Image: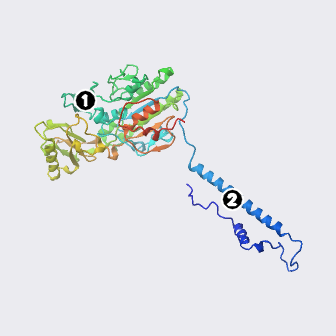
């Protein structure tokens, strides 16, 4: 940007002479010839010469003013380019959003190897500059459900991948589809409630029949990890072969990788690179199919991950046996330690004794674990307002794990579930379509904002959530 103090109106060299004439008006009235042989000519016309000089001054200043105006307009337009607006739909009659999850796609994976198809979306779309921030705990089910409800886990009910409801004693697992577990209103239910079509392919919670959503066979795929990625992509593409009125307004698509490999080998193994390339090739397959059908530039693609990944090894372990914590108190080990003491033990006393032991030096790696009453956790975690969350929560440092007993096995791998402020837990937010600017970067944000983003694109009212109403306008192109 050009500084406002730039001397656009700097005088040209001949202007100094003109200024000198102002200071010595008599000199300005001298005849052009000053030869001694012609000392003074009675026929000189001083008034005419004065008029000529005045006209020269005026023309010079007019030229300079015009140049200044041109420079201002040029630099102003350069620093304030025309406002980009949403592009009109070419083939679709109404907006469509395709939400894609690459499980465990840590921010930075897009740079580990050649990802031409993901790069194409980035270069021609909008990206969160430093990644997408997951909710806490940084686990698969809590985050996938936060993305589609806009709620923190304490409010949508899926507080962990596995947990116990203290009111009933019932166990939640990743195969639990009873509506009682799944609170809030996910996007597919929101659309069904508004009379719009939605389709889901393996998104956690989508098999739950709730509200107006009935998970029909045509639009809701029952989870089966053995289904090839190619078949998943092709199923989504076939929706675009339907009559325009039958094309779902909202679709989801899910890939287990690179999380599947990440747990086995960590975040830096060559097998992770292979998994990233495989997912990228599926994005390429999707793009190609949409292009052949003439829909690629019409569809709003939102490509995300649910969390990141960090390498772990057995040397970074903390054992609960060293703390005297009984196994039947534990509801979750690592990286999120969740303890529900029996009713005859005070959670506050349990926390105090555990922290005392951890600080004493008698527990291996004890300095890397901090234990809290859930209400004393940092408020930014939003992890207290649910009875499903046990009263005692332990947070371990990046790369460390908690186990009950020492075992002889020695293994390294990858994990997630840590504090969402840890950078390695971030994932990606990459978007392409008519509502997203080309080559644009936006600041990182928590994934609870995505719900309002989708409802804004589809121009429908959403359910109450933890996102902010103003957020979509900071990411989406205006319609006009």
Q: Which residue is mark 1?
A: 173
Residue drawn where x is 80% and y is 64% of the image: 52
Left or right: where 397 falls relative to 470: left
Quick check: can you spot residue 189? yes
Please state, as top left, top right, bottom left or bottom right, where the C terminus lies in the image: top right
Residue 136, image x, y percentages: 30, 40
Residue situated furthest bottom in the rendering: 36
User: Is 193 placed left or right of 338 in the picture?
Assistant: right
Whether 195 is drawn above or below 372: the answer is above
What residue is pinned by disc 2? 64
The answer to which of 18 and 157 lies nearer the viewer is 18
In the image, 149 versus 440, the foreground residue is: 149
Is 58 left, or right, of 68 in this rendering? right
For the question of whether residue 282 can be seen, the reply is no
Q: Quadrant of the N terminus?
A: bottom right
* Label 1 secondary element: loop
Residue 6 in the image: above or below residue 191: below
Q: Secondary structure at mark 2?
A: helix
Question: Which residue is depicted at the point 71% across and 73% down?
Answer: 23
How packed mark 2 is, by other alpha carbons closer than 10 Å (few <14, some 14-19, many 20 or more), is some
- In this view, which residue lies farthest toward the front? 47
Answer with the quarter of the image where residue 313 lies. Answer: top left
Quadrant hosting residue 3:
bottom right
**Is label 1 or label 2 in front?**
2
Image coordinates of residue 118 in percent, x first then y, are 45, 38
- Rate crowding at label 1 as few (under 14), some (14 to 19) or many (20 or more) other CA atoms within 10 Å: some
Measuring from the top left, give residue 286's x and y in whole percent.
46, 30
Q: Earlier in the sequence, mark 1 or mark 2?
A: 2
């Amino acid at each position: 940007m050009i500084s406002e103090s730039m001397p656009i109106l700097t005088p040209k060299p001949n202007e100094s002479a003109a200024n000198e004439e102002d200071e010595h008006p008599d000199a300005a009235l001298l005849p052009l010839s000053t030869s001694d042989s012609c000392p003074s000519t009675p026929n000189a016309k001083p008034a005419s010469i004065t008029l000529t000089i005045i006209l020269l001054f005026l023309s010079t200043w007019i030229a300079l003013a015009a140049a200044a105006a041109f420079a201002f307009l040029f630099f102003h337009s350069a620093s304030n380019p025309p406002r980009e607006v949403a592009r009109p739909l070419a083939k679709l009659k109404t907006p469509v959003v395709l939400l894609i999850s690459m499980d465990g796609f840590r921010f930075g994976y897009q740079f580990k190897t050649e990802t031409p198809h993901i790069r194409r979306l980035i270069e021609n779309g909008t990206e969160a500059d430093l990644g997408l921030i997951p909710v806490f705990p940084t686990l698969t089910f809590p985050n996938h459900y936060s993305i589609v409800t806009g709620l923190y886990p304490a409010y949508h009910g899926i507080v962990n991948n596995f947990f116990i409801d203290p009111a009933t004693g019932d166990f939640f697992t990743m195969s639990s589809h009873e509506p009682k577990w799944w609170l809030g209103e996910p996007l597919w239910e929101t659309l069904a409630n508004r009379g719009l079509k939605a389709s889901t392919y393996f998104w956690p919670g989508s098999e739950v029949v709730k509200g107006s959503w009935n998970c029909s066979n045509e639009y809701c795929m029952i989870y089966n990890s053995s289904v090839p990625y190619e078949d998943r992509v092709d199923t989504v593409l076939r929706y675009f072969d339907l009559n325009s009125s039958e094309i779902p307004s909202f679709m989801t698509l899910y890939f287990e990788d690179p999380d599947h490999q990440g747990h086995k080998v960590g975040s830096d193994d060559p097998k992770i690179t292979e998994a990233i390339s495989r997912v990228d090739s599926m994005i390429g397959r999707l793009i190609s199919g949409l292009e052949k059908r003439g829909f690629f530039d019409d569809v709003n693609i939102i490509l995300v991950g649910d969390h990141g990944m960090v390498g772990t090894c057995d040397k970074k372990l903390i054992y609960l046996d060293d703390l005297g914590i009984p196994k039947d108190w534990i509801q979750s080990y690592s990286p999120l330690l969740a303890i529900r003491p029996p009713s005859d033990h005070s959670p506050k006393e349990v926390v105090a004794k555990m922290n005392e032991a951890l600080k004493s030096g008698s527990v291996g790696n004890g300095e890397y674990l901090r234990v809290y009453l859930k209400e004393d956790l940092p408020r930014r975690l939003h992890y207290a307002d649910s009875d499903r969350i046990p009263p005692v929560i332990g947070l371990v440092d990046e790369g460390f794990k908690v186990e009950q007993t020492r075992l002889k096995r020695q293994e390294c791998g990858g994990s997630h579930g840590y504090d969402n402020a840890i950078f390695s837990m971030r994932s990606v937010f990459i978007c392409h379509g008519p509502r997203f600017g080309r080559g644009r970067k936006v600041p990182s944000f928590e994934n609870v904002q995505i719900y309002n983003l989708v409802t804004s694109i589809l121009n429908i009212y959403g359910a109450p959530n933890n996102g902010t109403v103003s957020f979509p306008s900071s990411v989406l192109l205006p319609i006009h």
